[in-house]
Image: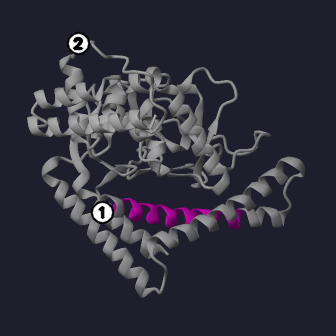
């Protein structure tokens, strides 16, 4: 279905994205980019109707099933090769399957691009242009391991993916780089990397995520020091749900097999940032399968996993756990940076009780701080505090 690939490529011509975020797009031309994507989505939907085919989402599911079947057959031949070698008919079948996989991958890439465009167009009002500085590197970390469109290796023309130096809960912009997916191709390997350009730090991204309203260092503090057990439990729930539904994590694909990655937990981790990883479903314990992994090595990546699995993001997961015995920062002085982070979280739609839980302050303290910053009026705070007192009184009466 080369016409589908052509339509998707024409819609994304000149546009690079990581996951659902567009890279290197300046504010004044964002509207043009979104309109281009919308036209591309409409063109694909019209073409599928003329071909009497299912909508893009259903076609995507079909291609994924076909691709999984082809990969399974290739892996069986691979195992046979190691055990006793391949006959001439086996070799011909292997070549045929690899050509078939290449065609399916092209088709799937096009459908993934259509899905990404649909999501961006549908939630356009949530998107903003932002320049990544030292305080916003968690936004880049959120995108680590997600599939990338139209960032190609200058040496071999294969895709490049966003990567970062390891073991850094809080990274600097200079710690990120592009890596060629050929690194994972055992037959035709490439280790080419490139630093991010200045333009690569300009993103058109969905900023209605509560985590993005927090600073990188503060997000690290919240996840690693205040709520690691809640995050750990929620990740284990994602693993259990994935096993039950036999579904990988949307937005993350193996660059070789193009199947969705599966979330795993290490047996003997060295802390929360060494505990979980995404791996190709074609992994084989005998070391003859695919060894592609995406390590969950930053707090923002937890949020990306929860988003992809419909959990609502990291802040919602943290806020939904059992409440602590009391606000740990009660009585501590407010800093300007902390006040700004609270304001950003409120502007991103995080509720005051959730903000209080995240920053270990009382709801009353948060309401009063928001009022002093002009985010709430005196009347709004009085109503909120009155409602809060009523809830607490009812709670004590019942108990």
If you read the primary sequence from the N terminus, does the residue marked by circle 1 or circle 2 appear first? Answer: 1
The relative height of residue 78 versus residue 111 in the rendered view (above or below) is above
Q: Nearer the viewer, residue 375 or 326?
A: 326
In the picture provided, is 64 more to the left or to the right than 114?
Answer: right
Q: Position of residue 165 (x, y in %)?
A: 46, 26
Q: The residue tagged with tag 2: helix, strand or loop?
A: loop
Mark toward the viewer: 1 or 2 = 2
Q: Position of residue 326 (x, y in %)?
A: 40, 21
Q: Which residues are drawn in magenta?
A: 95-117
Can you tell which quarter of the image residue 356 is in?
top left
Mark 1, residue position: 122
Q: The residue tagged with tag 1: helix, strand or loop?
A: helix
In the picture provided, is 310 more to the left or to the right than 373?
Answer: right
Can you tell which quarter of the image residue 177 is in?
top left
Residue at image location 80% in from the left, 40% down from the top: 286
Q: Residue furthest right?
A: 84
Q: Magenta segment, principal secondary structure?
A: helix
The relative height of residue 205 versus residue 136 in the rendered view (above or below) is below
Q: Nearer the viewer, residue 122 or 66?
A: 122
Q: Position of residue 78 (x, y in %)?
A: 77, 52
Q: Position of residue 360 (x, y in %)?
A: 35, 23
Disc 1 to disc 2, C-alpha distance: 42 Å
Mark 2, residue position: 333
Q: Which mark is residue 373?
A: none
Residue at image location 38% in from the left, 59% down from the top: 116
């Amino acid at each position: 279905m080369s016409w589908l690939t052509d339509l998707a490529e024409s819609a994304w011509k000149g546009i690079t994205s990581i996951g659902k975020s567009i890279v290197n797009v300046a504010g004044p031309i964002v509207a043009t980019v979104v309109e281009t994507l919308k036209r591309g989505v409409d063109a694909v939907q019209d073409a599928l109707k003329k071909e009497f085919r299912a909508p893009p989402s259903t076609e995507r599911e079909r291609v994924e099933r076909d691709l999984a079947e082809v990969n399974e057959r290739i892996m069986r031949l691979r195992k046979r090769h190691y055990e006793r070698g391949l006959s001439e008919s086996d070799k011909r079948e292997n070549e045929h399957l690899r050509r078939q996989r290449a065609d399916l991958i092209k088709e799937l890439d096009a459908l993934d691009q259509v899905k990404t465009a649909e999501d961006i167009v549908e939630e356009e009002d949530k998107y903003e242009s932002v320049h990544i500085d030292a305080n916003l590197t968690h936004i880049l970390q959120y995108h680590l391991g997600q599939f990338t469109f139209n960032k190609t290796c200058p040496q071999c023309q294969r895709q490049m993916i966003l990567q970062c130096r390891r073991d850094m809960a809080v990274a600097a912009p200079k710690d990120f780089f592009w890596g060629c997916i050929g690194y994972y191709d055992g037959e035709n390997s490439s280790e080419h990397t490139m630093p991010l350009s200045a333009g690569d730090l300009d993103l058109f991204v969905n900023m209605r995520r509560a985590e993005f309203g927090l600073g990188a260092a503060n997000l690290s503090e919240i996840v690693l020091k205040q709520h690691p057990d809640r995050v750990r439990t929620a990740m284990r729930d994602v693993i259990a749900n994935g096993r039950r539904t036999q579904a990988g994590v949307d937005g993350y694909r193996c660059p070789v097999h193009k199947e969705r990655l599966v979330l795993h937990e290490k047996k003997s981790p060295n802390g929360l940032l060494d505990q979980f990883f995404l791996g190709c479903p074609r992994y084989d314990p005998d070391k003859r399968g695919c060894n592609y992994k995406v390590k969950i090595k930053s707090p923002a990546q937890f949020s990306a996993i929860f988003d992809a699995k419909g959990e609502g993001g990291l802040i919602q997961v943290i806020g939904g756990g059992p409440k602590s015995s009391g606000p740990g920062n009660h009585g501590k002085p407010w800093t300007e940076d902390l006040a700004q982070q609270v304001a950003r979280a409120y502007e991103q739609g995080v509720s005051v009780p959730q903000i209080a839980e995240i920053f270990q302050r009382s709801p009353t303290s948060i309401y009063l701080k928001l009022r002093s910053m002009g985010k709430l009026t005196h009347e709004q705070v009085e109503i909120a505090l009155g409602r809060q007192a009523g809830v607490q009184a009812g709670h004590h009466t019942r108990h």
